[in-house]
Image (tube, grey):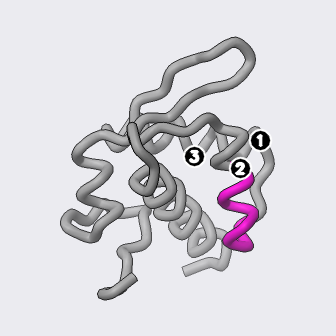
Amino acid sequence: MALQDIITEHQRLVILRLLAEVPGFDLNESILQDGLDAYGLDISRDGLRTQLAWLAEQGLIRLEKLGGTQKATLTSRGEDVALGRAVVPGIKRPRAGE
C-alpha cells in the first residue's frame, strides 16, 4: 500500500473519532482540520473537504453548509466505524484499546 493511501485511511479514521468525542457528534471543518494537525496528519482545507465528501458518500457523516464552511455530523454507522464495531474499506481500523 502506498504511503498516501495509509495517510488517507488514518485521516478518515481520525475525523470519525474526533466527531465521536464531542457532545452532539458534530464539528466544523476548521476544528476538524486543527484536530488532524494535532495528530500529525496535516491536511489542506481542500483535502479535508474531499475526505468529508467521501465520508458522507459512505453514509458515515452528514454535511451541512454554514456560510463559507461546513459542519460534519457523525451518523450511527460512522460511530460504529470510529469504535471498530464496523469495517469500511478505505478507513483504518482502530486497534484494540485505542
Secondary structure at numbered mark 1: helix
Foreground pick, 71 / 7 = 71
> Where does label 1 land, which residue?
45
Label count reads: 3
The residue that mark 3 highlights is 51
Residues marked 1 and 2 touching at CB (< 8 Å): yes
Amino acid type, callout 2: Gln
**Residue 33 vertical placement versus 67 (above, below):** below
Q: Which residue is drawn at 36% across and 74% down?
A: 93
Cα gap from disc 2 to disc 3, whole angstroms:
11 Å
Mark closest to the chain's N terminus, 1 or 2 = 2
Which disc, if any, is residue 22?
none
Give the residue displayed 62% in from the left and 16% down from the top. Answer: 66
Mark sitting earlier along the chain (3/1):
1
Residue at x 44% of width, y 44% of height: 55
**Vertical side of 19 occupied by 11: above or below:** below
What kind of residue is marked 3? Answer: Gln
The span from disc 3 to disc 1 (Cα, nearest Å) is 10 Å
Q: Mark 2 points at which residue?
A: 33
Q: In which quarter of the image is the N terminus?
A: bottom right
